[in-house]
């Protein structure tokens, strides 16, 4: 699981997608992402179920490639939907179902991620049975215009208190992602920067290459 949460973490964004979220996910998987998260705030549950089933088929198919682990499918907010489609887990926000309840419903083997926007929330999260934390919004983002940017310093502080995988989100672009990675993020999300791209696969590959550079630097002792 930890290896899947390294590199680019793909989240669907119907609001900015040019070709549709299923096409975007297919391209992101072709670029080698280890996680696909269905995030849908406006579709009906029936529509979300159809989308989740399609995304699960894509992840299952990608996992059949020799030498490549099956990418994870996570569902934003909806524990019921994750159970219905056999997803790998859920991603929860501070206002969603409590982690403890989600964990009881999903069981110990499924993945539960949690968003945090303060150091206090991060400390509380560590008392829960979570598998990773998402920190953000790092920078200002049109996805959540009312949420203040938490900045790189919060990512650094959260990194110092946990060895759990950290996913950074919010206003991240190929131009500033290296700063976020240097602050301790294991993975980054960029909904608009990818969803609105003319070539989703190439944009995801640009993000992925930044992590390849970091690993190469570690090997060379940078």
Image (tube, rainbow, N blue to C red):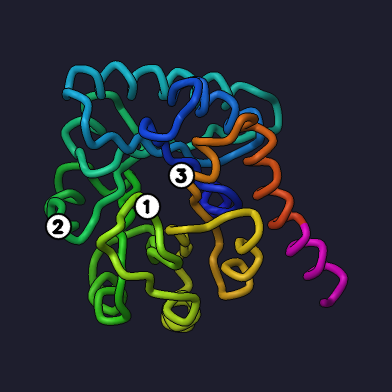
Decide: few, some or many residues near mark 3? Use Cα within 10 Å; few <14, some 14-19, many ≥20: many
> Of the residues under marks 2 and 3, which one precedes in the sequence?
2
Location of mark 3 (residue) = 191
Number of residues whose C-alpha sits closer than 10 Å to that of mark 1, classed few (under 14), some (14–19) or many (20 or more): few
Quadrant for residue 149, please give it: bottom left
Between 171 and 214, the residue placed more toward the observer is: 171
User: From the viewer's perspective, is 36 left or right of 148?
Assistant: right
The quadrant holding residue 70 is: top right
Residue 95's disc is 2
Residue at 33%, 45% in the rendered image: 109
Residue 33 sits inside the magenta stretch: no
- Does residue 138 sit above or below 15 in this rendering? below
Q: Which residues are magenta?
A: 213-222
Q: Secondary structure at mark 1?
A: loop
The residue under the point 36% across, 34% down is: 15
Neighbour tally class for label 2: few under 14, some 14-19, many 20 plus, Cα within 10 Å: few
Foreground: 172 or 87? 172
Q: Which residue is mark 1?
A: 142
214 part of magenta stretch:
yes
On screen, residue 30 versus residue 102, left or right, reads right
Magenta-colored segment: predominant secondary structure: helix
Relative placement, left or right, of 54 versus 78 is right
Question: Does 105 sit above or below residue 164?
Answer: above
Q: Earlier in the sequence, mark 1 or mark 3?
A: 1
Instruction: Give the x, y percent position of residue 52.
Output: 33, 24
Q: CA distance from mark 2 to mark 1?
A: 19 Å
- Who comes first in sequence, dot 2 or dot 1? 2
Q: Is residue 100 visible in this depiction of the protein?
A: no
Name the one closer to the observer, 94 or 82: 94
């Amino acid at each position: 699981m930890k290896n899947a949460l390294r590199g680019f973490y793909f989240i669907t964004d119907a609001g900015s997608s040019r070709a549709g979220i299923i096409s975007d996910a297919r391209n992101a998987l072709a670029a080698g992402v280890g996680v696909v998260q269905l995030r849908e705030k406006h579709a009906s549950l029936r529509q979300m179920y159809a989308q989740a089933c399609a995304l699960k088929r894509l992840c299952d198919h990608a996992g059949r490639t020799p030498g490549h682990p099956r990418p994870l499918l996570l569902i934003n907010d909806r524990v019921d939907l994750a159970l219905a489609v056999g997803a790998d887990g859920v991603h929860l926000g501070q206002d969603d179902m409590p982690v403890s309840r989600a964990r009881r419903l999903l069981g110990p083997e499924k993945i539960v991620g949690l968003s945090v926007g303060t150091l206090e929330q991060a400390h509380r999260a560590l008392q829960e049975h979570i598998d990773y934390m998402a920190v953000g919004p790092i920078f200002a983002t049109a996805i959540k215009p009312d949420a203040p940017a938490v900045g790189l310093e919060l990512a650094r502080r959260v990194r110092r208190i946990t060895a759990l995988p950290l996913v950074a989100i919010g206003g991240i672009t190929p131009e500033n992602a290296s700063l976020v990675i240097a602050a301790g993020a294991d993975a980054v999300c960029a909904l608009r920067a990818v969803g609105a791209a003319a070539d989703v696969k190439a944009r995801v590959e640009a993000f992925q290459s930044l992590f390849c550079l970091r690993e190469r630097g570690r090997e060379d002792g940078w």
